[in-house]
Amino acid sequence: MWKWLHPYAKPERSYQLASTLLPWFSVLSITTLLIGIIWALGFAPVDYQQGESYRIIYVHVPAATLSMSVYMAMATAALVSMVWQLKLADAAAAAMAPIGAVLTTIALITGAAWGKPMWGTWWVWDARLTSELILLFLYLGIIALHNAFDDKVLAGRAAGILTLVGVVNIPIIKYSVEWWNTLHQGATISKLDKPSMSTDMLLPLLVNILGFVLMIGAITLIRFRNEVIARNAMRPWVKELIAKELK
Amino acid sequence: MHFANFNDFIDMGGYAFFVWLSYGCAFFLIISLTVVSVRRRKSLLREIQSKQQRDEKLKQLRKGKNSNEPKT
């Protein structure tokens, strides 16, 4: 496996792989999200308790769950970059940070817009909401560090340390609804239990989560290619790329 | 279709503001991020190109200066 993986440690090969994958991720994510959103808004049944307002779940849950997954992916990249000094891992981590920040913002906004009609308040300082807000600040700090140094290696190291320290926040977010009393409900889908949602409501949610995953993949590829170009500006293959694309 | 007509769909059982606020914000943020990321590629390539051209010109200039200098 290592022999097979080895060529991808070369920036040029990774760039090409990202370019090959990008159209697939783009088309699949747009299709999946279109199906998921139309299903969620127009075809899923109404909730007996929350009425139509529960339809916010179809954006809120994918964004919130994946805001944590993206963080873990970014932390893995940061760790790889630190242990094996792999510059491409830094590029991947830098590419993912803004995506995570956007997902966290969406989770917070949709959560507030759902909390107002259901809880009677936009915001409470309880464990789940506060720890998700801290996640947003972590993302913003990481983005700021990536842009704070001209030397990308130094920037990657500083941002990587913050990323790894921030990992402690992830289990706090995940288990906050079990550890503390909170307005926020428990998990709807979990690995061990049966989902606490009927199938005709659950299916569009799963489709949307898949759509979000594919979309995050597509945006990561777009941003990863930019990061690779920026880090290899002096290489001949980037020169060739420029000659080909800017005539 | 769950809703009887289009107006019912827009109304969202009285929760129109909250539902459309959520979907609208999510859509706006994701599209913005995608547009910024796609555009960054072109501007990045242009920046690198202009830097390369500047370097090239400097090199030419230096070379030209050397060859034009009268040998004394």
Image (tube, coloured by chain):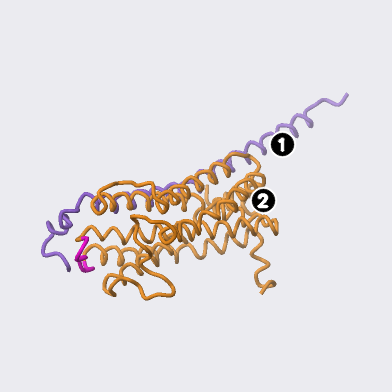
Chain colours: A orange, B purple
Query: How many numbered tags mark residues here?
Result: 2
Which amino acid, by three-letter code, is at mark 2? Arg
- Among all residues in the image, which is located at the extreme right? B72
Circle 1/circle 2 CB separation < 8 Å: no
Q: From the image, give the main secondary structure of the stretch colored magenta.
A: loop
**Which label number is shown at residue A75?**
none
Is residue A14 something that shows in the picture? yes
Give residue B39's position: percent from left, percent from top: 46, 47
Q: Which residue is mark 1?
A: B59
Name the spot of residue B50 as percent of width and height, x first.
Answer: 58, 39
- The residue at the far top in this view is B72
Count residues near mark 1 (Cα–Cα under 10 Å), then give few for <14, some for 14-19, many for 20+. few
Range of residues picked out in magenta: A43-50
- Image coordinates of residue A214 in percent, x first then y, are 43, 64
Q: Viewer-proximal residue, B38 or A80?
A: A80
Host chain of mark 1:
B
Label 1: which secondary element: helix
- Name the residue type under label 1: Lys
Q: Residue at x 45, y 51 (%)?
A: A131
Q: State the separation of the CA atoms marked 1 and 2.
A: 18 Å
Q: Which chain does the numbered disc 2 sit on?
A: A
